[in-house]
Image (tube, rainbow, N blue to C red):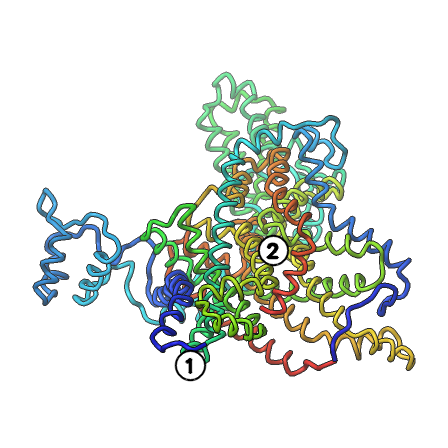
Amino acid sequence: MVQSPAKRRFYFAAFVLPALLLYGLFFIYPFGKGLAISFTNWDGLTPKSPISMPKAQFESQILDKVTRSSDRKFLLSIYSLTREGDAYARLSIRGATRNRVERIMARAGYQPENYKSIGFKNYSDIFTGKIDARFYPRRYTKVNYKETSDLPPEIAPADISRILLPKLSAEEKQAFDKAYSLENSTYKLRPEADEFEMEDRVWQLPAVADGTVDSSDVDSLMADIGDASEKSDSAALKNAVDSFLSKPGAAAFSAGDRAAVSAAAEDIYSLHSVKRILASKWVENKFDLGVIGFTVFFAVLTVLFSNLLAFLLALALDTRMKTRNVLRSIFFLPNVLSMIVVALIWSILFSRLLPFITGIDLWMGDPDKAPWLVVLVAVWQMAGYYMIIYLAGLQNVPTEIIEAAKIDGASSGQVLRYITLPLLTPAITVCLFLSTANALKCFDLVYALVGPSGYALGTVPFVMDIYFDAFANKLVGLATAKATILFLVILLVTGVQLLIMKRREVQA
Amino acid sequence: MSPKIMAAGERRHFRNEWVLEPLMILFALVFVFPFVFVLISAFKPDSEIMMNPVALPHEFYTANFTKAWNVMKFPQTFMNTLLITTGGVLGIVLFASMAAYMLARTDKKYSVLIYFLFAAAQVIPFQIIMVPEAVLASDLHLTNMWGIILLYWGLGAPTAVFMYHGFVKGVPRELEESAAMDGAGPFYIFFKVVFPLLTPITASIVILDALWIWNDFLLPLIIVKNGTLQLEQMAFHGQFLKEYGPMNASLVLSALPIVIFYLFLQKYIIKGIAAGAVKG
């Protein structure tokens, strides 16, 4: 095309600039800004230029340090003294005005407490373990019962036999059996093991009910029993009962009443000790993958399983089956749906259908199962996509080569290993690249499946942790630093992958 | 060697299709079961779902749908999503194809540089840019259904430019040159001569980007907060967590448009995605 250079430049700009400007404004600029934010401690709310500031502080920290008089004038056109005269305040500012105000403030060396430059601190905090412990893989102790709450009405036997029983002494076991009975394969709290009713056995005695025995004496008896069981001191229990029975009004007790008081006291004592046993011994040492661990777990397993499933499906559909087009459409279907819809469909299955079929109530709510279920849903959604790519790759493997190999006596397995797989390398490269990037960036699916409860379930991927830091925890600086690290990780992992796979590609 | 596409009657890895096919059909049934379950449950009142989640509905119960339709403000939500998807895709296709065409046809250093600038974006996770993007959008008053379209143009441009660029390089220049001889200007040449030749890759980009924008959640969540299908679906889930009947109905409603779109265009969608993945 013969054109003058000026004209060529004009057309180049006319064609390229719209896309470039949009890309620059909505992608590159926020990217740069994000990188910059990762070196601050911004909370996402604090503006760089304060909305209001005490007069003395504003004058000493900002106005006095503004050297140019034009800047000073500009600043004072934005900020004005409040009616009380003790502070400077501004209205909301946008765009160029805000930029100029922020520039002037930065030049004056002013940084708000929650939006100041902290260098590499976010990054070093992440690498030295100074941020939320849930970010890292860790061991922790899970306490199943707190002493201050009521005894649980039911305990699953698996828990008890695995965690609690091995740790109990014979005496403690006896106390436990007094409170719980094994019925229909669950430990049920015995109906008589009710502290309120036990205490009532004392309160209902005629001498107590009619006021012959002072009610404050009963209260102190109960307190003493509590203290005795706290120290697991049975002598103290006996003393408490004896001292109660020697109180002035206690002469009114019959022998049966006296026996009832000490029986009730012993029962209460034993119930307290069951609470103490449960609180101290019904604990588990657990391992939590943390954000990092789950991200790796999720990425490795989804990449592995979705590619494996996709490849097998593609192999099976690369035949002369009559139903292959229908089957292909079915396996691809989850992929056109949004991750939100897919996740919610599965969460209904997990909460309604599976408990009904299997009798096991907890699926997504169980930290032992949740990570695997998240992987299952992700594989279910993504496999169809990679299947299409593998299928396209398989259909490009020339049939003559396969037939020639078969004539030479190669088995199906050998054909797969020595002909199909090498020729399929480009498709494998693409699928590995896409599935790794997708797995590391997967947000919607996990967000809709578990939401914030993911932290308790150990199913928070990196991107979701970043989202919560940025929008819920007000740690925007830290969140963007994490995102930058994620960016580098994706770059590294996919880069290495591409490098390795490109070397293996062969031509048919 | 030119690859030969498989013809009917010859196949390679499995020979026993009569065993394989029933197995695959069985697996496909298991695979679609979640859909079937949600679809059936959508026609059952909550009490029936609680009693027996697997039984077929006793009657044709549509109250779930009425509720989901009204709460999600379905017509409005649907139109919003359609608007941003259409607007987003049109802009991406227009701007990216123009830019990619000019970049591919200009043999200059700066042209290559700009191309790499576009290509580099593909590994940047959205999480880095999300907070500044939200601030920017609110500064520019773009936190509405029209504004978010502009954001999609910017965010969708790099991948589309990358895909178009690869395709344009394979389109011979002769046609353009003869059109230029006849006195056609660059705009005329691009829109009348080149753009029609790009149809295969345009189809891929339209399908990929339409699915992306229609199904997108995070960007609408931080920019417009409510009003798109995915956002309303999530909000509905938050509000009616334990009302399984309406939940199922809302899922059927949200999935329906895209499933219909898929059923009619599946051949193109699958082809477009395979082509797009290999090119991209």
Of the pair B148 and A431, the residue shown nearer to us? B148
Name the residue that disc number 2 marks: A284
> Is residue A426 found left or right of A83 in the rendered image?
right
x then y, percent, for residue B179? 51, 70
Q: How many marks?
A: 2
Using a 10 Å C-alpha cutoff, classify the residue at mark 2 as few (fewer than 14 neighbours), some (14 to 19) or many (20 or more). Answer: some
> Is residue A140 found left or right of A42 in the rendered image?
right
On-image quarter of the C terminus of chain A: bottom right
Q: Quadrant of residue A167?
A: bottom right
Measure how far apart labels 1 and 2 are at the Cα level: 63 Å
**Residue sitting farthest toward the top:** A210
x then y, percent, for residue A505? 68, 80
x then y, percent, for residue B130? 42, 58
Of the pair B150 and B4, the residue shown nearer to us? B4
Identity, as a three-letter code, of the amino acid under mark 1: Lys
Of the pair B61 and B268, the residue shown nearer to us? B268
> Is residue A25 found left or right of A153 in the rendered image?
left
Name the residue that disc number 1 marks: B109
The residue at the point 41 percent across, 52 percent down is A471
| Residue A365 in view of the camera | no
